[in-house]
Structure formats: C-alpha cells, structure tokens
Image (cartoon, helix red, strand yellow):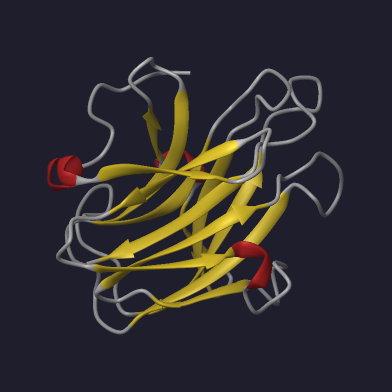
Amino acid sequence: MKRYGTVLPGPLRKVAAVVTATTAAAMTLALAPSAVAATYQYDCRRLAGAGTYSNPLRLGNVTGRTVVAVNCPPLTSGAGYANRYFSFSLTRPARVPSYAGASFVLNRTQKSAVNPSLARGPYTILHTGAALWTYDRSGVFNGRYLPLAPLPGSGVLPAGTYRLNMQKLDSPLRSLSTPWFNVVAAAP
C-alpha cells in the first residue's frame, strides 16, 4: 500500500486525534475537528436503521458539525457481512475541509482496513480509491477518509442525502474481519 506524507487537506492539520476504547481487545481512533464545529458522538449499535443498502444506519444532518459513530462492530468475510451502510445529509454544499470515512486500529488478527465509498441514490460518487489513508506516528494505518470538499479534481459535494458504504475489501486469507471502527462525517 502506498503511504502518503500528508494525507488530509491542509486545513485538517488542526484535527486532533481522540482515542476511544471500543473493547478490551481493540481500540479505534476518532478524528475530532477544531473547537469551531460541534461534535456529536453516538454509539454505532444504537443508530436508527439496519446498516443495509436499503435501510442504512442514519447519522443525520452533518451540516456545520462532525458526527462520530463509535464502536461499530467489525466487518467480516462472507456474503452480506463485508458491507455496512450509513446515511447522512447536507443542507448546504460541503465546505472545505469536509470529509467522511472510518478510523480503526489494525492488529495481528484483524489486518483488513475499513474502506469507504460514497453514493447518492443508485450512483457512486466517490469510490474507495479516492479515499485518503491516515496513519499514526509509527506509520501504522488507522483510517481512510473521502474528501467531500474539495472533491478530487475540483468542486464540493452539493446539498443532499448520501449513502456511505463501509466495506471490507481484503480477501479472507489476509484477515477474516476488520477491527472495530468509528465512522466520522464532518462538514464544518
């Protein structure tokens, strides 16, 4: 996997890492914005919705705030278990820096990253390949985020409702599951 020196846009350098314990065996990393935007934290297992394509877990309106869903159970290999869907809405176009994705901590038994993609209705807007990797000071990957503003190329994400797909992409031979993870959607 290719590593990038600066993986988030310049304005996100003010982002501070907040470590949240998820279980005794695993921890995930949640990104928190500067104090200017409000941060709302919810337990992933208590969100409305089923986490399916047609009934995603609902993060709600993320305009002007950061929403963090913590303690999301691992994604596992096998039909129907390698994806979990979330939805969020923007009441205005996204502003720089806006992003959505997952934070996680890989370990010896859970080597598969959580990979985000973004869709609106039946159309995929941002594929996993557009996601930026984040990693800790020791160089271990700990997140993947899609930029919502600025978008790769140019422009920003317009107002609307979006579906964020979290997926396990690696083959079962590498790892049977991802670690526990947090979902972060920020549109300050």
> Residue 109's spot in the image, x, y percent?
73, 22
The residue at the point 53 percent across, 51 percent down is 182
- Quadrant hosting residue 78: top right
> Residue 39's spot in the image, x, y percent?
33, 66
Whether 78 is drawn above or below 134: the answer is below
> Residue 101's spot in the image, x, y percent?
45, 51
Whether 98 is drawn above or below 113: the answer is below
Q: Quadrant of the C terminus?
A: bottom left
Residue 112 as seen in the image, left or right of residue 131: right
Whether 85 is drawn above or below 32: the answer is below
Q: Looking at the image, which is closer to me, 79 or 110?
A: 110
Residue 36 as seen in the image, left or right of residue 94: left
Residue occupying the far bottom of the picture: 91
Whether 10 is drawn above or below 81: the answer is above
Residue occupying the far front of the picture: 24
Residue occupying the far right of the picture: 78
The residue at the point 46 percent across, 74 percent down is 88
The residue at the point 68 percent across, 65 percent down is 45
- Quadrant hosting residue 54: bottom right
> Residue 46's spot in the image, x, y percent?
66, 72
The residue at the point 69 percent across, 27 percent down is 110
- Quadrant hosting residue 49: bottom right
How many labels sit on residues? 0
